Image (cartoon, helix red, strand yellow):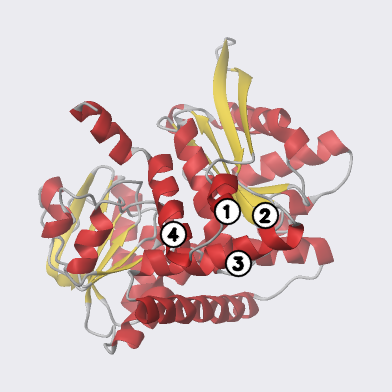
Amino acid sequence: MNVDAVVKQSSNPFISAQRQLRNAVDRLGLDEAVYEILKEPARVAVVSIPVRMDDGSVKVFTGYRSQHTVATGPAKGGIRFHPGVTLDEVKALSMWMTFKCAVMELPFGGGKGGVVCNPKALSRGELERLSRGYVRAIAPIIGPERDIPAPDVYTDAQVMAWMMDEYCQLVGADAPGVITGKPLVLGGSAGRHEATARGCAIAARETARYQGWDLRGATAVIQGFGNAGSIGARLLHEMGVRIIAVSDSTGNAYNPQGMDPGAIAEHKRRTGSVRGFPGSEEVPDSEFLTLECDILLPAALENQITADNARDIRARLIVEAANGPTTPDADPILFERGVTVVPDILANAGGVTVSYFEWVQNLTRTYWTEDEVNQRLEQSIVRACRRVLDIGRQHGVNLREAAYMAALERVAAALRARGWI
C-alpha cells in the first residue's frame, strides 16, 4: 500500500469507526457475528435534491442518510449541512451514534444524515427549500418509530422546524416526534440547546473527581467556539475553570491569565471571530492543540488529534465535544502518556440524551421544565461516566475502549435477544 493510501485510510472516519468496533468485539470476546452485523450500516440512502435557487436556476444537491442499526430501537442521529460531507463520514457517524445511545442506555440505534452544501452561501429561502427537499427525499425511511433526525453541524432548530413541518404535510398528521432539536413552540425540549455542552462539562467534572482532582482553578483550551464550544466554555468557567484559549474557523485567542467566555461570545457576535479579543494574542494554528492546560475540549470536526501531534499534547484531560476528533492511532499514544480522553460517545452524549427526553415528551404530550431536564441529564451522564470509568480501571484500558465495551455489551445483548446471533 502506498503512502497516500495509508494516509487516506488513517483519516477515513468510517475505517476508524470499524477499527474501534473490531477492538471492542475482541476485548469482550464476542461472537464474530456481532462484528459482521455491525461493521456496515443496515441501510444507507443516497438522494438527489433539486432546489430552485433565488435566481431561478435549479441546483441539485446530494444528501445521505445512514441507519447503522435498529436492533436497540429506532435510528437516531443528526443531519449536517457542510461542503465536506461524505458518505463514509455519515456512515461512521451513524455507527458512533449506535454506541453513544448504547453507552447512555437509550432505546435507540444509530443514524446520521448530511447534505453536501455550503449553508453560509444559501439565502434563507434556499436553505428552507433544501431542508424541505431533503425530508421529502428520505421521508419513506424516517418517522417517530423508524428514524428520528436532529440538528448537527450547520443545522439548527429552525431547520428542524421546516423539516418537521414538511414531514407532517407529507403524512397528513401532526408528528412532532419525527425530529428532535425543534423550537420550544413546536414541541422542542427545554434544555436542549445547552445539552451537548452541559454533558461535556459534567463528564469533565466526574472524570476529574474519579481521578482525585478538582476542576476549580484548572485551565482549559477550547477548540471550536460554536454551540458546544462556547456553551462548554461558559459552563466550565462557572465551575471555576480558567479559559485560557479559544479558537474558531477564523483564528484563535490566547491569554494564560484567563478570559471570560461570555465576553468572547459577545466579541465574536460583533466581529464574526474570536480573533482580536481584547487582552489576547493569537498563536499559530499548529500550536493551538498543544498549549499547556488541564482540559482540552475539541469541539470542531474529526481527525484533529492524530499520531502526528499526540506526543505534543500537554493537556491532562481531553473531553471530546466533537465527534471523532481523535484518530485511533493517537489513542494509545495519549494513554501511554497518561492523558485521559473522555470519548465522544460519552462526552458529547448530552445532546442525544435530551433528544431522547424530547422524543418521550412528544410521544406523551407531557413537557418538563428546564430544571427537570437538566436534573435528568445530570443523573444520566454521571451514571454512564462512573460505569465507563470503572470498566476502564477494571480492565486497564483507555476510556474509549471502556465506553465501547459498555456500549457493545448492550448492543450484543439486543442482537442475541432478537435472535440475530
2 or 3: tag closer to the N-terminus: 3
Helix, strand or loop at mark 2: loop
How would you rate the neighbour count of disc 3 (Cα within 10 Å): few for under 14, some for 14-19, many for 20 or more?
Answer: some
- Residue at screen point 70% across, 28% down: 137
Distance Cα–Cα, label 1 vs label 2: 7 Å
Quarter holding the N terminus is top left
3 or 1: tag closer to the N-terminus: 1
Distance Cα–Cα, label 3 vs label 1: 12 Å
Distance Cα–Cα, label 4 vs label 3: 15 Å
Residue receiving disc 4: 26
Helix, strand or loop at mark 4: helix
User: What's the residue type where badge 4 is placed?
Assistant: Asp
Distance Cα–Cα, label 2 vs label 4: 16 Å
Please state which of the two labelled residues, at mark 2 or mark 3, is closer to the viewer.
2
Q: Are marks 1 and 2 in contact (CB under 8 Å)?
A: yes
Say whether residue 366 is left or right of residue 44: right
Helix, strand or loop at mark 3: helix
Q: Which image quadrant for residue 107?
A: bottom right
